[in-house]
Image (spheres, helix red, strand yellow):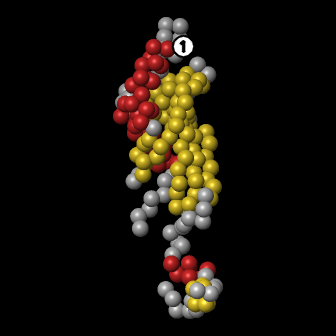
Amino acid sequence: MADTGITLQDVFEAVIREFHSYASNYKNYWGTIPENFTRPSFLYLLTFSDSKRSSFFTLTTRLNLQVIVFTGLDARGVPDMGQQLSILQTLKPFLGQGHVAVKDRNLSFTYAINRADVEISIDFKFEFLEDAVTPEYDAQQLWDYMEHIYINKEELKTDGLT
């Protein structure tokens, strides 16, 4: 069976790919931004992540990702509101579809437009299910965990079953 596990990096890379496809003139920074960074640019930050077991076989993973949009500056040296509105309009097709391709999956998301100081930010929320069974877990281990199997109230011996 192919590995279908999704990592945080997979989600970051998928979102970066989508942003780049709509705004290829923007530079992409992941995690930190240098002191003399290039404008216009996007800064991608992980703001929250957790996983909890939904059932014996599945995990629910929640991930919040913030993208801070650094547009050009106006004559006063503050972010240009016209450019901020323009980039939001440019990204609208992606934001409006509410999903992104990650590996062999299509993850849905919700988003909100907020402020990060004087810049705008786009805050994404992802929630998706993943397999909780590890690759090391196989059919033989399943049989090892079963001490007693009952069929029609009669115990079935598990010795030699594979």
Q: Number of marks in the image?
A: 1
What x and y, as percent, mark residue 43? 51, 32
What x and y, as percent, mark residue 3? 44, 62
In the figure, 50 relative to 64: above or below?
below
- Residue at the top extreme, as displayed: 75
In the rendered image, the quadrant that contains the N terminus is: bottom left
Q: Quadrant of residue 28?
A: top left
Q: Residue at coordinates 61% horizontally, 90% vertically from top-left?
A: 154
Q: Please tell me which residue lies in front, 96 or 87.
A: 96
Observer able to see residue 34? no
Q: Which residue is mark 1?
A: 78
The kind of secondary structure element at disc 1 is loop
- Residue at the front extreme, as displayed: 152
Q: Residue at coordinates 46% horizontally, 18% vertically from top-left?
A: 85
In the figure, 26 relative to 83: above or below?
below
Observer able to see residue 154? yes
Circle 1: is it few (<14), some (14-19), or many (20+) Cα within 10 Å? few
What x and y, as percent, mark residue 100? 43, 42
In the figure, 38 relative to 99: above or below?
above
Q: Please tell me which residue lies in front, 134 or 130.
A: 130
Q: Which amino acid lies under the numbered mark 1 shown in the image of this protein?
A: Val
Q: Residue at coordinates 45% horizontally, 38% vertically from top-left?
A: 98
What x and y, as percent, mark residue 136? 53, 72
Q: Residue at coordinates 49% horizontally, 14% vertically from top-left?
A: 81
Q: Please tell me which residue lies in front, 70 or 38.
A: 70
Q: Quadrant of residue 147?
A: bottom right
In the figure, 22 relative to 108: above or below?
above
Q: Is residue 117 left or right of residue 18?
A: right
